[in-house]
Amino acid sequence: MNFTLKQLRYFEALAQHGHFGRAAAACSISQPALSVQIKDLEEELGSALFERGARQVRLTSFGEEFAGRVRDILRSVDELGDLARVSRDSLIGRLRIGVIPTIAPYLLPSLIRNLSRSHTGIDIHVRESLTTTLIDELNEGRIDTAIVALPVSEPSLTEVALFSENFVLVRPAAEATTPPPRREDLQEMRLLLLEEGHCFRDQALSFCNVKSALPRDGLDASTLSTLVQMVGAGIGVTLIPDMAVPVETRSADVAVSEFEPPEPSRSIGMVWRKASPLAPQLEQIAEVVRRTGEAMQEAPAALTWATRRKSPMEFR
């Protein structure tokens, strides 16, 4: 067999995207060039890897098996590159980091600035997605590490807890002067939540002691921004993480209240493959994440009061 590593990367991109145009864009080549490379690879193998459709392509049964082997090869190649970076005793070059959507918009601006200062020359590539997707991509070697809510309980991954944060209740501004509801009262309220797949949804349901399977007439949104704006429109109430308050409430007519102890909270941490040669460097990155998260927890008071000038807020 005489095929190239570049062809394997093109194959992996097409298998991932299921579309020649999107795969070509991801590989920074033209679609005709990608098609030629895939056709040459199939001819070299003597078997079709994809079923071509009008709008998308699908892996053949042989292609499915081939894809698993290719992912292993590419992950090993990437780890060789990581090993070379480790030998230089510094994290210079590309860092592929995944972050879940309920953390990314609030933590990343400060984190990227801090990483750029502490690791000169670092090239940060961010991937925002749900926890399950990030874990899959981490195991497949597509990203180096991920910032998620713990635990993930994945035997192949190292988990490092970094900081914790509380959840707060967001209500319509008209309710700012009324006492916040008790946790058990939330079961009877119109509770707006993120859509299925978000770990924050499960955490909120757990705190409110509401079963996800129960029929609900609220709104399932894909972002915290949508939830807060809907609360401002008087549709219901929601929970958001403390770090999201300054960003999400500044343009919404809402009131924000803390819960009575024990307050709902989540643990934020980093995960990476146990076999990753970058583990020592990722521990350094984790320390920067920890310091960034702790600094944000010390700042909310100032940020929150700045927000209050635009929308009424209440903190107990």
Image (cartoon, grey):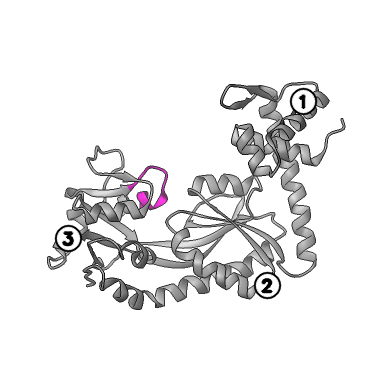
Which range is magenta? 194-203
The residue sitting at 50% across, 70% down in the picture is 110
Tally the marks: 3
Residue at mark 3 to residue at mark 1: CA–CA distance: 63 Å
Which residue in the structure is indicated by mark 2? 120
The mark closer to the camera, 2 or 3, is 2
Relative to residue 256, is residue 291 drawn left or right?
Answer: right
Relative to residue 216, is residue 126 drawn left or right?
Answer: right
CB contact under 8 Å: marks 2 and 3 = no
Please state the horizontal and vertical placement of residue 148, each as a whole percent of the image: 49, 56
Q: Residues within 10 Å of mark 1 (few under 14, many from 20)?
A: some
Assign a secondary structure to mark 3.
Answer: loop
Residue 198 among those drawn in magenta = yes
Which residue in the structure is indicated by mark 3? 181
Amino acid at pointer 2: Thr
The front one of 4 and 271 is 4
The residue sitting at 13% across, 68% down in the picture is 177
